Image (tube, rainbow, N blue to C red):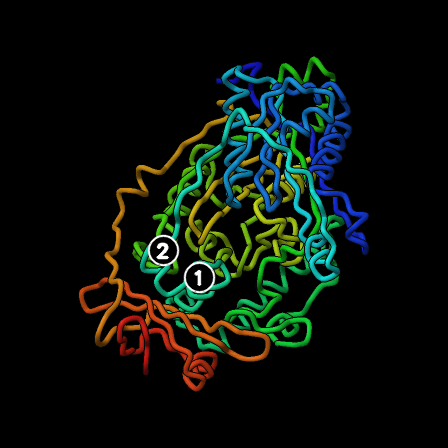
Amino acid sequence: MMSDNTPVLVGIAQLEQRIDDPATAKEPVELMIDAVKQAAQDAGSSELLKATSVRVIRGIWPYQNPAKAVAEAIGNPGAQTGITPYGGNFVQTTLNQSALDIQSGEHDVIIITGAECGNTQAKAARAGVNLSWQPLPGTPDVSMGEEVEMRHEAEKRVRLGKPIQLYPIFETALRHDMGLGVQEHLEHISRLWAGFSEVASHNPHAWIRDAKSAEDIRTPSAVNRPVSFPYPKFMNSNNNVDQGAALILCSEAKARSLGIAREKWIYPWAGTDAHDHYFVSNRDTLCGSPAIRLAGNRVLELAGMTVADIDRVDVYSCFPVAVQVAARELGLDMNKPLTVTGGLTWAGGPLNNYVMHSIATMAELLRGAPGEKGLITANGGYLTKHAFGVYSTEPPSQGFQHNDLQADVDALYKRDVAFEHEGEATVEGYTVMYGQAAPEQAFIAARLADDRRVWATTDDVDVMQAMTEEEFCGRSVNISGNLASF
């Protein structure tokens, strides 16, 4: 049932900062303030700056309550303040919650913003410059989620826990499941990433706009060093960016009363949230996501659509495997564009805030194509936390709808874990981690005869080299404790 409280996205802004001297660069909260002001200008109403809530996506900065600083800077010190935990899913999750808060009448205008200055931080570290960013103390009024432990003790035992370690393990498991050869698979994922690069070349907000070929992307070079097989640098999220963004949501009634032009309005139709088992060790498979399948398909059902009804999609793209798993779980056509921005490598990966850029870009494209429908997917952790949103210029028939699918995911199988093992196992997925010039360590996920999962490592140079040339998934491995030998 539609009402005057139906939420609409009316203001969007994206900005980049490219400065050679880190000492002269704006810090993230300043980019947030600029983005919020630009979003109000985009909507054509400075009255939106009187929002009843300001919500910030947490980043790699020292701030405790940046929303308060933003609210004060826009002349609205009394606004409710909010912050999220870490996770790339939380932009869409926050928008979902904000749409519900507007629809319930709790708020009539909500500002969501975030920014990172990873490029400035990197330059400052190289130059020995102390950035002296403000601490912005205090406790926000609300938190859109909670911090949770996502590393199993068995993973900690082998020092496994970085995204650049786990996502390539998922990738090799997926490669084996797809039945692709090592070189065939490299060509496959490099073509996927070249398509994303091509989209970024046409995105005025993209950090890297010179399109790369598939061969450039898969071939190691001075600017594309090996990181974690099968990923060279060009297949990793690019956090070395200074980017900020803002979204302003309000009720239909508020949009009308402020005279915001109808062609600016973007309706969130539906949203969903769910997370896979927090510990990778407990997941049934390393190359699938029940949470994406359940929550992603449910958001389409809530919107009264199938995947065929979606005109534009932005699939979260921290690494190629994240895109492929989502496409498989949702039935997306891999031959069609799966990004509107160019993704986290090329458009830029401002850590947890990327999805604010994908939503803003989607909104801009939908404004130019009235009636089309857009799907946003968001991912946090180790392909762990997921959020989805469907958007259009047209109003939904029943107002904004939201479901949390967590109970359905929690009911699914949890694999048991062995902390160590003596004897044979079968390789399920693996990666080879590189130092400055050569392989340093391989991480291996393996299955035991009783179906438990175990983790192991090796630093055998010959084995690591072979792992980059031959398929090791499905092979027998001998494990002693947590050390692997072939």
In this view, the residue farthest toward the bottom is 462
Three-letter amino acid code of the residue under disc 1: Leu
Front residue of 36 and 355: 36
Residue positioned 42% across, 36% down in the render: 301
Q: Is residue 301 above or below residue 130?
A: above
Lower sequence index among marks 2 and 1: 1
Residue 124 x %, y %: 72, 56
**Quarter of the image holding residue 282?**
bottom left
Residue positioned 48% across, 45% down in the render: 307
* Discs 2, 1 touching: Cβ within 8 Å: yes
Residue 310 x %, y %: 54, 43
Give the SS element for disc 2.
helix
Horizontally, residue 430 falls left or right of residue 224, namely left
Residue 411 x %, y %: 26, 42
Q: Which residue is mark 1?
A: 166
Crowding around mark 1 (Cα neighbors within 10 Å: few <14, some 14 to 19, many 20+) is many
Residue 51 x %, y %: 65, 20
Three-letter amino acid code of the residue under disc 2: Val
Residue 280 shows which numbered tag? 2
